[in-house]
Amino acid sequence: MSSNRTIKDSFFLIIKGLAMGAANKVPGVSGGVVAFVAGFYEEFIYSLQKINAKAFKLLIKGRYKSFFQYINGHFLGLLILGMLISYFSISKILDFFIEKRELFVWATFFGMIVGSIYYIAKDFHHWNKKTFLFLLIGISIGLSISFLSPAKENTNLIFIFLCGIISVSGMTLPGLSGSFILILLGNYVLLLVDSVNALYDTFAQIFRGDFSFTKDQFRIKSLTILTVFTLGSATGLVTFSHLLNYVLKYFKNITMALIIGFISGSLGVVWPWKKTMYKVDELNNFMLDSNGEKIIQNYQRFLPSIQDLETWYAIGFIIFGILIVLALDWYGKKTRQ
């Protein structure tokens, strides 16, 4: 992989990182799908694989330039920068629109996933009894995950580390939403809302020269949780990339069929027409169940009325989501030429 990229290439890498970061935060949407459709999935996995024993040897020996080139650092660095920016900007915009126009946001993501299924499946020509079976397995797992009940929040640091490992699955395995897995584990709000907001508030205070947060035990705990979660995520990224490379090398066709099934099954997660079932504590900005305990949002799905004008607007946003994926497909082909 060439590290001599133009300013334009670097800019678009950050944009791709923004898109992956935003997708990873939305339950049901996979950042890996963004990478897959935009045409940089293979380079992403390839670069992660380079974070290995040889890379650490170069780092320990002080050969920083060789280390940077070996791991394709320019590509990974800009992509990760985009993801980090996304968590403090794009993701907050998404949070706003989910609160104000939830139906249209979910409709757009539903369309993007439909477009992703078309994109991945159109070039897959290895259907047989075995791959079809794994397609059905993928769909079944995706649908089963969609309708599981979330667990309660758990702040145990070992569990937080495991959450980090599992949550990045959406970056390396298209169709498996890491953020939705965090919902099922009960830690979505804790890790992708509370902890990220704590880091944002901490940076804001530091820039103002205010270090009073060091005496805030709740803030320190939140930052500790975020640190452990980040370490788990980094571990998961490297681990999953090596594992995925192995299965794609030796079981490529059934893995692709499974991925298509995962993505198809995830449509149940982002079904636009659903009622949100939770209570919100306005003072502390988190959700409560009937016993007053902290929970994440849960949904009751329903079929839309074709007589409702809002339904047709939502269908329009589904088409818009499909067009976004087609545009990414077009851009990916253009950059690969």
Image (spheres, rainbow, N blue to C red):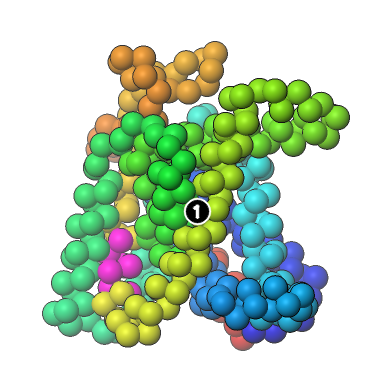
> Which residue lies under the disc numbered 1?
232
Name the residue at 68% across, 49% down.
Answer: 85
Q: Which of these two is toward me, 52 or 9?
A: 52
Q: Residue 195, located in which quarter of the rendered image?
A: top right
Main SS class of the magenta portion in the image: helix
- In the rendering, at what x and y percent does residue 285 appear? 52, 21
Q: Secondary structure at mark 1?
A: helix
Name the residue at 35% across, 41% down.
Answer: 185
Against 195, is 141 above or below?
below
Answer yes or no: is residue 257 visible.
yes
Q: Residue 138, located in which quarter of the rendered image?
A: bottom left
Question: What amino acid is at disc 1?
Answer: Gly
Q: Which of these two is toward me, 335 or 285?
A: 285
Against 46, is 207 above or below?
above
Does residue 277 appear left or right of residue 34 in this picture?
A: left
Name the residue at 42% across, 78% down.
Answer: 245
Does residue 96 appear left or right of residue 275 in this picture?
A: right
Q: Residue furthest front?
A: 61
Crowding at dot 1, Cα within 10 Å, few <14 / some 14-19 / many 20+, comes out as many
